[in-house]
Image: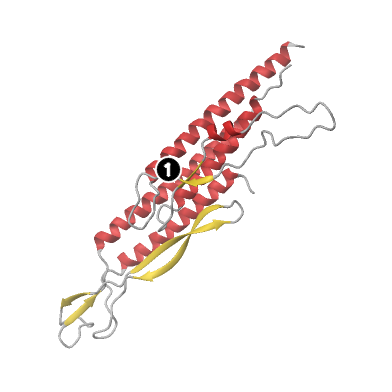
Amino acid sequence: MNPIFLFNLASRQLQHLATRQAVISGNVANANTPGYQARDVTPFRDVLNKTALSMAATHAGHLELDGPAARPARATASDGWDVVHSGNSVNIEEQLMKAGEVSRDQALNSGVVKSFNRMLALSVKSGQ
Amino acid sequence: MIDPLAASSRIAGAGMGAQSERMRVISENIANAQSTGQTAGSDPYIRKTITFRTALDRASGTAAVAVREMGEDKAPFKVEYDPGNPAADQNGNVKLPNVNMLIEMADMREANRSYEANLQMIKQTRSMVASIIELLRP
C-alpha cells in the first residue's frame, strides 16, 4: 500500500506560508524605515522541486538521505513596485496583496486537509 | 526559532508601536505650532523629527522595527512682525516655530495608514491561526 503523503505535504506548505507571513509582516512594519529593502521567500513551487523523494530504508545499514525535511524558506530581496527617495522599497498595497495570497492559500490548504481527514475518518468508521 | 505566525504578530506589534510613537511626535509638533520663546528675541519651539531603523528580532531572526532617533528639524524659523508680542526682539520681529501644518497632516495620514496596515497583518495572522485550530474540531 502506498503511504499517504498528503498530510506531510500540507504541513510543509503551512510552514512555508507561516514563514512568508512573518516576512511580509516585517516588510509592513518597516514600511517607513529608510534604506529598507522589501523581502520575500522563495516560492513553494521551487522549494518543492528541489526536494526529492526519500528512499525507503529496508535494511539497518541503509543511510538516510536528506529527504523531504522541511528546509526553512529563505528571504530574498524582492523587486518592489517602487522605491521612494529614502531608499525604501516597501509598497503597502503590494504587501497586503501578498498577505491576501498567503491567507487564501492557507484557507485552501486547511480546507483540503479537513476534507481528507474526514474521508479517512469515514473509511475507518465504515470498516467496523 | 519560535513559530513564524507568533513572530508575525510580534513584528506587526513592533510596527504599530513605532507608528504610534511617530503619531505622538506629530501631535507634539501640531500642539506647539504657535509656541514662541519665553523671553524677548529667544528661539521658539523647534519641530521634532523621528526616524526608524530595522531591528533584528532575535527570537525569530526576522526584521522588526524600532525608533532610531528623535531629531530636530533644521529648517529656518518663520519670522513675523508683531511688536506687541512678548517674544518680539527690539525690531519687533517674532520668531515662530518651523512647523508646517500641511506637512504634519500629510505625515499623520501616512502614520495612520502604516498603523492600519500593521493592524491588518495582525488580524490576518490571527485568522490563519484560528483556521488551523479549526482543523482539530470534529
**Going by the image, does A51 lie left or right of B68?**
right
| Residue B136 showing in the rendered view | no
- Residue B132 position in % (x across, y down): 60, 33
Q: Nearer the viewer, residue A126 or A18?
A: A18
| Residue found at x 58% / y 52% | B61
Instruction: Say if A65 sits above or below B96 in the image.
Output: above
| Residue found at x 23% / y 82% | B87
Query: The numbered mark 1 sits on a residue in which chain?
Result: A
| Placement of the C terminus of chain A among the 4 image quadrants | top right
Q: Nearer the viewer, residue A24 or B122?
A: A24
Identified by mark 1, the residue type is: Gln
- Residue A54 position in % (x across, y down): 70, 29
Instruction: Say if B27 sits above or below B41 in the image.
Output: above
- Residue B36 position in % (x across, y down): 26, 77
| Placement of the N terminus of chain A among the 4 image quadrants | top right
**Going by the image, does B28 lie left or right of A1?**
left
Q: Would you name the residue on which mark 1 appears?
A: A95
| Residue found at x 44% / y 48% | A38
Q: In which quadrant of the rendered view does residue A12 lie?
A: top right
Q: Nearer the viewer, residue B76 or B39?
A: B76
**Going by the image, does A113 lie left or right of B13?**
right
Instruction: Say if A22 sits above or below B107 in the image.
Output: above
